[in-house]
Amino acid sequence: MKIPIQQYWILLKVYFRPQWPMVSLLALLLLMSIGLQLLNPQILRHFIDLAVASSKGNEQALNDAAKSSYSIATELFITALLFTGAAVLNQFLTLLAQYVGENVGWKATNELRGDLAEHCLRLDLSFHKEHTSGEMVERIDGDVNSLSNFFSSFVIALMSNMVLLLGVLIVLFQVDWRIGLGMTLFVIFALLIMKQIRTIAAPFWVKVSIARAEFYGFVGEHLAGTEDTRSNGAVSHVMRRFYELLRNWLPVSRKAGLAGYSMWMSSVFVFALGNALIIILGGYLWTRGSLTIGTLYMIFYYTELLNRPIENIRTQLEDLQRADSSIIRTQELFQTISKLKDAGATESVSALVQLNSRSAAAFNVDFNNVSFGYTAEDRVLEQLSFHLPEGKVLGLLGRTGSGKSTLARLLLRFYDPDSGSISFGDVPIHTLSLRELRRQVGIVTQDVQLFHASVRDNVTLYDPEIQDARIIEVLGDLGLTSWFNSLPNGLETKLAAGGGGLSAGEAQLLAFVRVFLNNPKLIILDEASSRLDPATEQLIEQAVNKLLQGRTAIIIAHHLTTIQRADQILILDQGKVLEYGERLHLLNDPSSRFNRLLQTGIEEVMT
Ligand SMILES: Nc1ncnc2c1ncn2[C@@H]1O[C@H](COP(=O)(O)OP(=O)(O)OP(=O)(O)O)[C@@H](O)[C@H]1O
């Protein structure tokens, strides 16, 4: 697929404009280098003609030299020195241009990488469920990497090559119009051929990127799940799939490589034609005495010089093909819009004011006929309604798969209901910005995600505004002081990746610290279904007590002790409300499901 030229412009405008001083410097360096490249063959011509004239004793040339204050030998020496100086200076300028170009390119690609990562983080959860983490790495990093060359050298290098091409042609016209015309026709022919074959390889490179993303997605996923893979004896299955993906990758990259090779071949052929043309034309003019030997050599030199920009333009077009596929995929990603419509700033602020004016510390939570399914066919929640007054606790019960976690996800707006509405303090949650909404809700799940970062970063989630004193106070409140004192570097202590080295209880407690620091008004607690050791369990009990003080809460409950905290009970069954009411009322009603659950032993029924 060929993409319109405007797409490149948009990309360049966005990422180059902030760096315009560096981009201008780069352009200047390249222009100076082109000037030197055009000058050098002229120096060479002068050198050769002078040398030939002196050996033949050409009177005119010798007279000219005699008029100047130099001897011929000195002039030859100075000319050679000039030639070498210009060549060295040109190398230096090229090096500098490369350095500046790389810098400009890296800055632009880093910006793009950041924008893409931010965009993806804003996408709804269904997008992230559909794409593995490895695939995301490949798309955000891999694709942007292929664009780095486009940014660092493509535009500037392409333009400078064009200028060099034009410069050479002008000089050739000045030497002899027939040579100029011949070479112009040749350049037009060469560029047309290059343009024609530009589209050959792009679709192959798109396939290569897809195969690569799939492979890395697979590897990333299985590295993350290596424990499960090994313990379940699925290694051979994983390896089979691994080789299968590699096998799919090989033919597409071979085809892409062959398409690239055909482009290389075509340029070799074109150069051969150019050389033949100049040999015939130059030879003809020399035999007729229209050219000196120095001029003839200069024309050859320029033809060689002409080959370089044509060759460069060819490789840059090849790079562009690679960039084409990356641009396509990058734009696809940018065009993926979140299914969640975020509230506009004004709408969100007024909703927030309304929310805060109604409820200073906590707010009531209402579900009105909420229905939801992850796919159009499957209903996960059906016509769900409840009213949880502010500061009260709802105990959510139900078998596995009944929709408890889904309900929590809707409260955080990871997804929007298909029908019905959810409100906090009578304010519909979709009128709050996602950022504000999620600030109001704190969630502690069984599966605590800890990062390979310091304790501070893990609990503040990189918010630099949270003071150390506050963190230490919360750690103390949650009974983690002795654990904290045992850390070798205090808050700076790095946690192992995935929270390795921490017990499940400690990880849960750190999740509580996170929520405390955020100070939300609604707490969602997905209680650990497995038993912790009694000491940790007691700590968690205390933490929960503290956390729930003055806040509204929904607890996905697995234990009797937690149920006793609830003011209301909601039992879900296949996404429908099986029973809903005040806990004490249901407790005292022998015919209630809740009462029967308690008789049977809730742990057995709920897990
Ligand atoms: N991302 C998803 N895409 C599609 N279906 C999903 C997704 N997440 C959950 N489901 C399905 O939705 C239903 C409800 O799942 P949910 O996780 O809400 O249940 P749960 O009551 O929290 O279960 P558990 O107690 O095991 O956590 C299940 O049938 C599950 O298979």
Image (tube, helix red, strand yellow):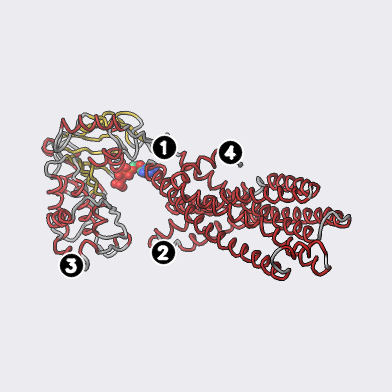
Q: Is residue 251 left or right of residue 499?
A: right
For residue 4, which numbered disc appears in the image?
Answer: 4
Tell me where residue 534 appears, x and y as whole percent.
Answer: 15, 60
**Residue that label 2 marks:** 230
What kind of element bears circle 3? loop
Tell me where residue 314 appears, x and y as whole percent.
Answer: 66, 52
Q: Is mark 3 within 8 Å of ligand 1?
A: no
What kind of element bears circle 1? loop
Tell me where residue 213 appears, x and y as whole percent.
Answer: 51, 52
Whether label 2 touches label 4, CB < 8 Å: no
At label 2, counting other C-alpha atoms closer than 10 Å, the crowd grade (few under 14, some 14-19, many 20 or more) is: few
**Residue that label 3 marks:** 486
Q: Give the number of the mark in front: 2 or 4.
A: 4
- If you read the primary sequence from the N terminus, does the residue marked by circle 4 or circle 3 appear first? 4
Q: Is residue 370 above or below residue 287?
A: above
- If you read the primary sequence from the N terminus, does the residue marked by circle 2 or circle 1 appear first? 2
Q: Is mark 2 within 8 Å of ligand 1?
A: no
Whether label 2 touches label 3, CB < 8 Å: no
